[in-house]
Amino acid sequence: MDQLANYMPILAPIAIIQLILLITAIIDLVRIERTNGPKWLWALIILFINIIGPILYFVIGRRSN
Amino acid sequence: MSQWLTLLQKETLEMWRNFKWIWVPITFILLGVKEPLTSYYMPQILDAVGGLPEGAVIQIPTPSAAEVLITGLGQYTTLGVLIIVLTTMGIIASERKSGVAAMILVKPVSFQSFVTAKWAGSALLMWISFFIGYLATWYYTGFLFEWIPFDQFLQTYFFYALWLTVILTITVFCSAALMSPGIAGFISLAAAIVISLVSNTLSNWFEWSPAQLTAYANEVLIGQGISDHSLPAGILAVVCIIVLLSLSVLIFRKKELAA
């Protein structure tokens, strides 16, 4: 735990931007009408695959009308 | 001019609506920052992962700040290029497919401003995202290793951004010339890979190649100064961008009139 506290100032910003990425992906997923593939699958991918999940969703999951 | 600005505004607004202004910069930050972090924490990571035989001593030489920054920049020329191509491959092809392009071009909008505004929009996104990402990488490298002078940072940013813009323009060109976004993306990726492979392996013959700009940027970071060849390479990159843009306007006009 001690060590973790030492790393916090360095890792916290990254954790925060990663969280922003995840939240925007989820907001977008909720608002979008249709996606490539089932929506619930994308929700799982965004939530459980770190970093790459939301990026994958934005790159291939969004279907632009 | 005001019409062109309106089109550019429409482009940026669309990128806000589909969150490109949020996720592309964040992706670029994460791509670059990963490098200084993993090289700094490599001993701890090895410790935590374990699996090493008892008493094994691994001496990892601490990389220099320039080396870390160069590998971080390497991420932008591989995964960064992938993201640039994937986000821009559809900008013209998919609009034509969905009929949006026809809807806009019914109005008195010139083909030229339509294509160049699209290019400028995605170039703006790429430059800003790359700047933010590279700035974060530079900051972390300085924080964990040593500070690289800021003017070197700006020089290398300029070199890399120029090469990435060439790739972006190739993608816009393919997007204008081909019907399907997928094929456009594939061809522009292949072109980018072939160009950089050929000019990096035969670097003595292709000193003027725009792909060599990244190598010249790395030389700046190592401290060898700006190479003499960077000027012709830079000029050729700008010429490539202009020629490809005018070609894409030409092809797009022809195709759109035929359709």
Image (cartoon, rainbow, N blue to C red):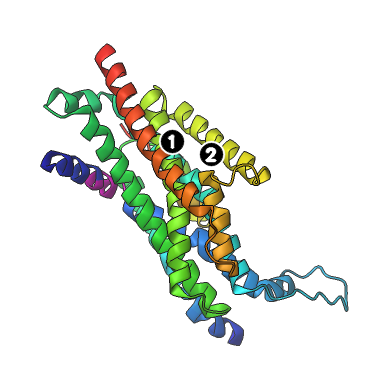
Looking at this rendering, what residue extends furthest in the top direction?
B258
Q: Please tell me if label 1 and label 2 are on a single chain.
A: yes
Q: How many marks?
A: 2
Q: Position of residue B115 (x, y in %)?
A: 28, 33
In which chain is the residue bearing label 1? B
Front position in the image: B151 or B145: B151
Q: Position of residue B82 (x, y in %)?
A: 51, 44
- For image coordinates 74% across by 75% down, the residue present is B61
Q: Position of residue B199 (x, y in %)?
A: 61, 42
Q: Secondary structure at mark 2?
A: helix
Q: Quadrant of the N terminus of chain B?
A: top left
Bin the neighbour count of mark 2 within 10 Å (Cα to Cα): few under 14, some 14-19, many 20 and up: many
- Kindly identify which residue carries mark 2: B192
- For image coordinates 57% across by 81% down, the residue present is A4
> In which quarter of the view is residue B121 placed?
top left
- Kindly identify which residue carries mark 1: B170
**Residue A50 is inside the magenta segment:** no
> On the rendered structure, is B109 left or right of B191?
left
Mark seen at residue B141? none
**Residue B16 is inside the magenta segment:** yes
Up-down relation of residue B6 to residue B128 (above or below):
above
Cβ atoms at labels 1 and 2 below 8 Å apart: yes
For residue B14, say whether it is visible: yes
Q: Secondary structure at mark 1?
A: helix
Magenta stretch bounds: B12-20
